[in-house]
Amino acid sequence: MKWRDNIEKDLKPYIERLIKESYNYRKSYNSARDKGKAQLWVVIAILSRQIYNLNLKLDYLEKALQDIAGPKLREVAEKRRKTEEKEIEKFIKEISKGKISKGKKIIKKKKIKKKAKKKSIGIKIAKSL
């Protein structure tokens, strides 16, 4: 009984294909001291090559999709950003007017007494939004 007969049916075709493909490099691994290990390294190299080729194809397809959909994606992102900015501005205005309620209580603007202006050192803080 071969060890390959005990392998799950799902994996069996893949292992058989790799073993058959590794036979193409029989001359290389037959010259090694430990032929089994050498054959395993050949199979690892075959798998590595397949992964590398798949990554190249995937990168190419991703770049092609970005080239095709790039302007449209930027347009959608810009629209989303603008709507978010409008919502934030609206929210800030509502807070400043005291229209936003927290539970049942209404948040009111606190009155701040004006204090005498002191001379500033020259540092100015920019207001954002």
Image (spheres, rainbow, N blue to C red):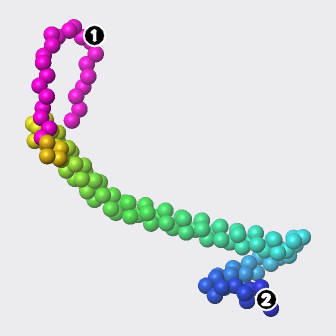
In this rendering, position of residue 86 left or right of residue 63: left
Quick check: marks 1 and 2 in contact, CB under 8 Å?
A: no
Q: Where is residue 119 drawn, in percent x and y?
A: 21, 8
- Pick out the residue farthest to the top: 119
Looking at the rendered structure, which numbered label has been put on residue 15? none
Tell me which corner region of the image, top left, top right, bottom left or bottom right, holds residue 25. Answer: bottom right
Q: CA distance from mark 1 to mark 2?
A: 88 Å
- For disc 1, the marked residue is 121
* Along the viewing direction, whichever of 110 and 38 lies nearer the viewer: 110
Q: Where is residue 101 drawn, in percent x and y?
A: 14, 44
* Along the viewing direction, whichever of 91 and 16 lies nearer the viewer: 91
- For disc 2, the marked residue is 2
35 is higher (above) or lower (below) than 109: below
In this rendering, position of residue 94 left or right of residue 119: left
N-term-proximal mark, 1 vs 2: 2
Specify the principal SS of the magenta part: loop
Check disc 2: other Cα within 10 Å, few if <14, some if 14-19, many if 20+: few
Magenta includes 123?
A: yes
110 is higher (above) or lower (below) than 114: below
In this rendering, position of residue 62 left or right of residue 45: left
Mark 2: which secondary structure?
loop
- The span shown in magenta is 106-129
Check disc 1: other Cα within 10 Å, few if <14, some if 14-19, many if 20+: few
